[in-house]
Amino acid sequence: MSEAAPKIRLRDVHKRFGEKVVLDGVDLDVAAGQSLVVIGGSGSGKSVLIKCIQGILRPESGSIQVDGEEVVGMRGKRLEAVNAKIGMLFQGAALFDSLPVWENVAFGVLQTTKISRADAFDLAVDTLAKVGLNADVAKLWPSELSGGMQKRVGLARAIATDPEIIFFDEPTTGLDPIMADVINDLIVTCVKRLGATAVTITHDMASARKIADRVAMLYKGKLVWVGPIADIDSSGNPYVDQFIHGRAEGPITMDVRR
Amino acid sequence: MTFLALIGRVFLTFLAAVGRLTRFAMLSVAHMVQPPFYPRQILRQFLDIGYFSLPVVALTAIFSGMVLALQSHSGFARFQAEGAVAMVVVLSITRELGPVLAGLMVAGRIGASMAAEIGTMRVTEQVDALTTLSTNPYKYLVAPRVLAGLLMMPLLVVVADILGVFGGYIIAIGKLGFNSGSYLANTWQVLEFVDVASGLVKAAVFGFLIALLGCYNGYHSKGGAQGVGAATTNAVVSASIMILIANYVVTEIFFAT
């Protein structure tokens, strides 16, 4: 019997903006139910990678499959159907300013089902409870929330549709260490509860160690190492070693003008 | 050679921008007529454009009508043709000043706000968030605004026409000593359906352009606060220029003999 097809499959994906090559032949498989963390420095192409998988950006060449369906070039209803399987927590939460918290959380459900607004409100309150927020928050506006609370509401929005795949874009960036750990715990709990496939991009190693089953390291648009989180300290890969220890010296160079 | 290359590059950039705007307009119109529709979004835009623009449009119209009566009276007095004041006021307001001034005021108010709101949503990834939540940003953000612009501007211009003529009437009766009955009779006598209709067609065209350019500039804004600021400025400037160009085109269609 053949091995189960991966939930997400990328083959030779290339993406550039003008002269700048952002993804340079990325091959990656994410198995169903797995939590993959993509690490890499700023500007290494991590965010572009997940935007390509969601069809927000279109790669110049290569193949991206979600559940065996080719996403590259997909548009309209078919792309919306693929995105209906996906939840996403954005780096800055990306909550809709013009909607109260509960409508942010229930937005995906209101768009994809014929649920009444009263039931959507109840669902939003239940989902907020799962991320440790009480019902009082539901009627607030996003601008009234702290950064940590916005991240939690963003997480609630990401899981409200019971997605099969969840993307986390730098979930702990800009948070204090305690709130970052709270968010990490919530991510682990929510992903396990849903049985979802998770792809997280981060440069926070504490977060990666807590969330990941597997880790992929992206550098200058290429995956330089992919392996289980347990192997990361003994990877023998100079890029990974430099990154996880946060050393300025090593093969990873920062383009700094002097 | 370098100079020619520069001209060529500018021309190609211009053509590319026209192409992008045309595609944006076609997509917006297509999404405006295809379900799903977002009634709450449409209603919000109707209120924002139609209702909350009323004070600024009303004040602009009424004072323009008053100034028009004063100016035309002072000018026509040189030829003993003061009787033409009612005609000048009503034709100027309905054909030109009502739609153009309302259009320019709404471009400043609504075009800027659309570009700023959508631009902020773009740079804070809210537009991407819509896509990930299976919602087409054109349908959710652009189509309701363009539809509201198209339908609300004519209503605003009806108000502007009435108040503009009323402004002229106040000055004519209160300050210039005209007889109320004969001023109104002159106004009605000279006014034809095409005068009002051409103004309303202009208003619909202006409303479409204001909303389209506000959404287009916001949707394509880049960077951060500076990008949103630039988008807002571009939205107002491009809409104002397009209003003046479209005004000539529609006038040519209606009144060129």
Image: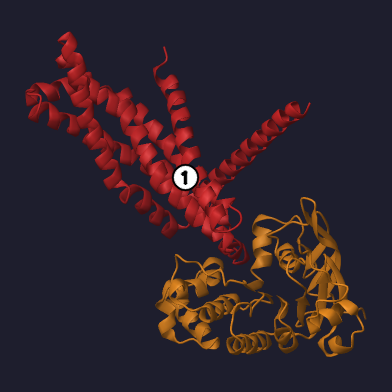
In front: B254, or A148? A148
Chain letter, orange in picture: A
Identify the secondary structure beneath mark 1. helix
Q: Is residue B60 left or right of residue A31?
A: left
Which amino acid type is marked by label 1?
Answer: Ala
Q: Position of residue B172 (x, y in %)?
A: 13, 26
Q: Position of residue B247 (x, y in %)?
A: 43, 28
Quadrant where the C terminus of chain A sits is bottom right
Q: Quadrant of residue B250?
A: top left
Q: Which residue is mark 1?
A: B211
Answer yes or no: is residue B168 visible.
Answer: yes
In front: A45, or B180? A45
Answer yes or no: is residue A116 visible.
Answer: no
Q: Residues within 10 Å of mark 1 (few under 14, many from 20)?
A: many
Up-down relation of residue B127 to residue B218 (above or below):
below
Q: Position of residue B242 (x, y in %)?
A: 48, 33
User: In the image, what residue occupies the spot 39% across and 56% down?
Assistant: B44
Q: Chain of mark 1?
A: B
Up-down relation of residue A191 to residue B214 (above or below):
below
User: In the image, what residue occupies the spot 48% across and 39% down?
Assistant: B237
Quadrant where the N terminus of chain A sits is bottom right
User: In the image, what residue occupies the spot 22% across and 36% down?
Assistant: B62
Chain letter, red in picture: B
Q: Quadrant of residue A237?
A: bottom right
Q: Quadrant of residue B69?
A: top left
User: In the image, what residue occupies the spot 15% across and 16% down?
Assistant: B82
The outermost residue toward the top is: B79
In front: B44, or A205? A205
In front: B233, or A155? B233
Question: Colour scheme in the image?
Answer: by chain
